[in-house]
Image (cartoon, coloured by chain):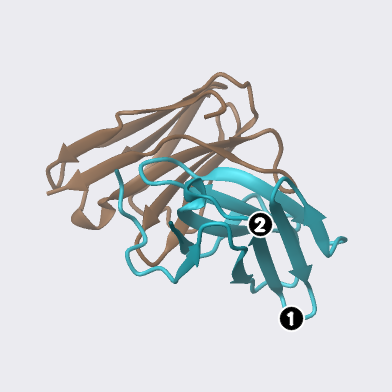
Chain colours: A cyan, B brown
């Protein structure tokens, strides 16, 4: 499969532990944020989103936190599993813009 | 993959040749996008479409053109491929612009030699 992002930030956690992936965004006009997961050889897959009028949103085993004061976004994955190993991207939508702007991504490795 | 098909999945071409990548969707979504993915750059928008025959440039549009003659198909053309266009290309669709997620295809790995 594809091997993009060879120079990505990496995070290794033990199976069953919680992981936190961080993302800094640049535009204070961004009003919508998404986390994507990309497995080797596949396209990015939607995980969870959050709007700028919220500071926390929970899904199944995942939580996204938004701190607009410092322009920081985080993805928390609870009780990590081997299938969580992937590259994770945050993306922001600038209000009124026609596109999502993606961060570089973080490679998460789950150790057995 | 949300009814998105990219073709071809892999292609090797020579510098200076024209190349067309196809994105086909069965979701009837209005918005379609072409991104490229390179190490150290994440995904960067090349062109997008907001309807049939309605397209606009993204942040890395030089050397690329697009066409959308019907809702379900969005074509990306490299008029004269260069080695700097070696990349993985992703098509994405969304039901509206902004404030909603985009669904991605499986990607096309293009190598220009």
Work out whether residue A93 can be spotted.
yes
In-front residue for pair B82/A73: A73
At 20% across and 52% down in the image, what residue appears?
Answer: B82
| For marks 2 and 1 on the same chain, the one whose residue lies earlier in the sequence | 1
Cα distance in 3D space between marks 2 and 1: 24 Å
Is residue B103 shown above or below A66?
A: above
**Camera-side mark, 2 or 1:** 2
Q: Secondary structure at mark 2?
A: loop
Count of labels in the image? 2
> At 76% across and 67% down in the image, what residue appears?
A66
User: In the rendered image, which quarter contains the N terminus of chain A?
Assistant: top left
Q: Picture coordinates of residue B20 (x, y %)?
A: 30, 33
Q: Residue at x 65, y 49 (%)?
A: A98
Residue B70 numbered mark, or none:
none
Q: Which residue is mark 2?
A: A78
SS of the residue under disc 1: loop
Q: Nearest the camera: A99 or A37? A: A37
Q: Can you identify the residue that label 1 sits on?
A: A70
Image x and y of residue A31, in percent: 77, 60
Front residue (pair B57, A56): A56
In the drawing, does residue B28 fall left or right of residue B91?
right
Above or below for B5 versus B98:
above
Residue A19 sits above or below residue B110 on the image: below
In the figure, residue A112 lies in which quadrant?
A: bottom left
Image position of B21 (left or right of A108)? left
| Number of residues whose C-alpha sits closer than 10 Å to that of mark 2, classed few (under 14), some (14–19) or many (20 or more) | some
- Where is residue A5 shown, x and y percent of the image? 37, 61
Q: Is residue B79 visible?
A: no
Chain letter of disc 2 in the image: A
Q: Chain of mark 1?
A: A
């Amino acid at each position: 499969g594809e091997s993009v992002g060879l120079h990505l930030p990496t995070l290794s956690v033990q199976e069953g532990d919680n992981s936190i992936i961080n993302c800094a965004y640049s535009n204070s006009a961004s009003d919508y944020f998404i986390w994507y997961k990309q497995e080797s050889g596949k396209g990015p897959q939607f995980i969870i989103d959050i709007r700028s009028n919220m500071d926390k949103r929970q899904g199944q085993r995942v939580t996204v936190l938004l701190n607009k004061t410092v322009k920081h976004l985080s993805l928390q994955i609870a009780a990590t599993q081997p299938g969580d190993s992937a590259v994770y991207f945050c993306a922001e939508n600038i209000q009124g813009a026609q596109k999502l702007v993606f961060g570089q991504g973080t490679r998460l490795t789950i150790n057995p | 993959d949300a009814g998105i098909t990219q073709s071809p999945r892999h292609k090797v071409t020579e510098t200076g040749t024209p190349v067309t990548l196809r994105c086909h969707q069965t979701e009837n979504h209005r918005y379609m996008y072409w991104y490229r993915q390179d190490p150290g750059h994440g995904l960067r928008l090349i062109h997008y479409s907001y309807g049939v025959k309605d397209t606009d440039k993204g942040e890395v549009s030089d050397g690329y053109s697009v066409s959308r003659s019907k809702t379900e198909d969005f074509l990306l053309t490299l008029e004269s491929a260069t080695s700097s266009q070696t990349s993985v290309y992703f098509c994405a669709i969304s039901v509206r612009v902004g404030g909603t997620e985009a669904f991605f295809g499986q990607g096309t790995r293009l190598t220009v030699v």
